[in-house]
Structures are given as C-alpha cells and as structure tokens.
Amino acid sequence: MQANQVSHLFLRSAIYSGSNSRSLIPNLFHGLGSKKVVLYSDRVLKKIGLVDMVVELFNSSRKEDWPELVGIYLDIAPDAESKSVNKAAEFARTVGADSLLALGGGSVMDTVKGVKYLLHNGLSDIKKVMPRGIVYERLPNARRIDIPHIAVPTTAGTGSEVSPIAVIYNEDLHVKGNIINPFISADIAILDPELTTLLPPKITAFTGFDALTHAIEALVSPKATSITDAFALQAIRAIEKNLPIVVSNGEDVDARMEMLQASLMSITAFSFALHAIPIHNFAHAYGALFRIPHGLANAVFLPIVMEKIPNLYLPKVKQLAEALRVNLEHQDEDYTLSLVLEKIRSLQYQTGIPKDFKEFNLTEKDLERVRALVTSDPAAVAYPLSNDVIDNVGQAVVPLSVK
C-alpha cells in the first residue's frame, strides 16, 4: 500500500473463543444491558439439538434482572432472503425484544444483521433499503446501532459474525445486495468449536472454501495492507492445514477451533481490503440466479477465475504459495501460479468439492442469462470483468456433457 492512500480497519466485535464459550451468552447479554432477547436460528439446528442447547443456558442461569429469552425464530431462508428478513424483524417487534442472538451459518447471521438495521431505522422492508443493490455507510456518517447483538457461528466460512457487511437476497430481482455499515456486526462473537462438530462434511468443505476465497481475494486486493495481509496469510495457512482434517473427522475440536478463527481472520482481511473480488462476483451472480450455495460457488470458481485472470494474482503469488505450502524452488511467477492452482485443486479433491456445477444442470443458454448479472453485481463495481472473461469462466463450470 502506498503512504498517500487512506485505509481503515474498524474492529468492533469482542471475541470469545473456546469449547463451551457459549455458556457465557446470558451473562454477556446482561453486561450489554439486555432485558429481552430473541434467538434466531434455523430448523436444522433445532433438529440436531443446538438451539435447545443455547435455550437451556437462559433457563438454567436465570437470576433476578437477568435477560429473558422472549422468542425463538427458526424460519430463516437460505441466502437471507429479503422476505425472510422482513418477517424476522416483525417477529422481534411482536415479542418486544430489545436484543438479538444469532445462532447459525451465514444466512442466519446476515438475516439478523438485516433485522438489526430495520429495527434501528424503524423500517419494515429491507428491499427499500438497497434499491440499487448496495448501501455503503461509513464513518463519520454511519451512526451507532444500540441494539445488543451476539452472534454464534455454527459454520467456519462466512465470518459474518464480525464483518461489517450484510448480504441480503432480493428474490424479486434475483440479486444479492449488500448493506455495509461498521456498526452492523455483532457486539460479541462466540466461537465455540463444539457447536460446529455436527456440521456435515459437505457443508464443512463448502464453508471452508468460502473462508479460503475471502483470504485469497483479500491478499491480492489493490487495497491490501500489511494488517490485512497478516490476517489473510495466517487464515490461508490454517485452512490449508485444518480443512482436510475437519472434513474427514468433524469431531476434532482443535481443528474446528482453528477453522473458526481462520474464518474470522479471512472475513476481516476481506472486509477491509475490499476491492477486486471477481470470484465473489461470479459466486453472487450464479448463486442468485441458480440458487447455488455461496460456499460451493466460491469453491468451484476459485481456481477457475484465478486461471482465467492471472494478472490479478501474480504480484502476490509467492506469498500465497508459501502459505499453501507449495514448493518454491522455481522462481518464475507464472509457474508458481500453476503450482498454486494445482494445490487448490488438490484441496478440492481431498474435501469433495466438485470441479463444476454438473448437479445444477446448467446449459449454454443459462450462461447467456448470467452474463448480465455478473456485470451488474455490486462486486463488479471496483473490478469489472470483460464479456470474454465472463464467458470463458462460464464455459469452465458447465460440464462438457451438456455443451
């Protein structure tokens, strides 16, 4: 980074990490001045017992003037759909909640951020907040959001518990929009690896590659700094080492802890080096149009996009190679990039990530439809992609059998 460029790093979330750190939740809400807490999660986490595990914390530690759990909302849609966000906010108003507890993956985290934004601004429809797909509020214009908010991730991927970004899906326009505000993240993030041990191998792999994508896009960003590089490189090291472990043995609590912290470091680097994010650009567009899970979309696009637009990655390819434990005997940057891509594809294979979107039955006509979305996605503003690149990447994710 050049000295005449201005960067910013605004870390406002307190972080508590370790096994059973979830037990601190009621006391932490008490410290935040909470009276009435609403718990947001989903029905899968309810079914496997994680929701009840957290509810019991409020029941067993009830004291005078202690925060009360006044409601549980489980009807959260994938991709934080705007209609789901609106209904979730209305639920908080109905039960009279003054505090928000998010338990889940990225969809839950982003939904609760949307709820927080609506409540703070006295609004009822999140779609009206971002009619053009993005709302960017930063200091000094952004104002504090005084709604106590604790986030407990059950996946190690989005890092949404600490990011200043809420990704909300507009199901009418088939577009993923963004609210960027330094106060929208949780006041406190709880990283409890025991809550991630039941995550299936497939979802573990998808979300882990989401975190890896955050870190790589942060590293190569034109707005990267030494601080964001430190977070990104350490996250890459931890993911390369621990993702295969947690996919093969989900009960390895130590590796799960490393992945949670890597996810948090990745999104921190990504959020504050935010600029050129072509992998996310494709993932947003394809995810919005074809409902491909975000982590899977990033996982498939990662090596393909890096191969198609190498010039973005070459300046930092040696640092990336070192973090991925790639042999650096050869000094040529182009060859080093080929080794990095080989390593990423090997990691895909080890963790069961597909090479393309065969299961979604995409066709040549679908590629024509998605071009406009890639171009218009908010992620394309800083780093627009040519039609040739968009088409070449698209050709790589459609199986040969349907071409």
Image (cartoon, grey):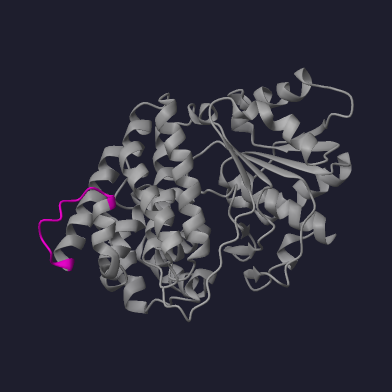
Q: Quadrant of the N terminus?
A: bottom left
Residue 61 colored magenta? no
Residue furthest to the bottom? 4
Q: Main secondary structure of the magenta part?
A: loop
Q: Compare residues 341 and 124 and report the one nearer the observer.
A: 341
Residue furthest to the front? 3
Q: Is residue 69 left or right of residue 173?
A: right
The answer to whether residue 303 is seen in the rendering is yes
Residue 325 colored magenta? yes
Residue furthest to the left? 330
Q: Compare residues 254 and 155 and report the one nearer the observer.
A: 254
Residue at 48%, 81% in the rendered image: 4
Q: Is residue 255 left or right of residue 184?
A: left
Q: Quadrant of the C terminus?
A: bottom left
Residue 147 place in picture, x, y as percent: 79, 49
Q: Quadrant of residue 337?
A: bottom left
Residue 156 place in picture, x, y as percent: 48, 41
Residue 137 place in picture, x, y as percent: 68, 69
User: Relative to residue 228, is residue 110 depicted above or below?
Assistant: above
Q: How many marks?
A: 0
Residue 134 place in picture, x, y as percent: 62, 69
The answer to whether residue 361 is seen in the rendering is no
Residue at 86%, 37% in the rendered image: 35
Residue at 80%, 53% in the rendered image: 146
The magenta stretch is: 323-333
Q: Quadrant of residue 279?
A: bottom left
Residue at 32%, 53% in the rendered image: 356
User: Relative to residue 21, is residue 243 depicted above or below?
Assistant: below
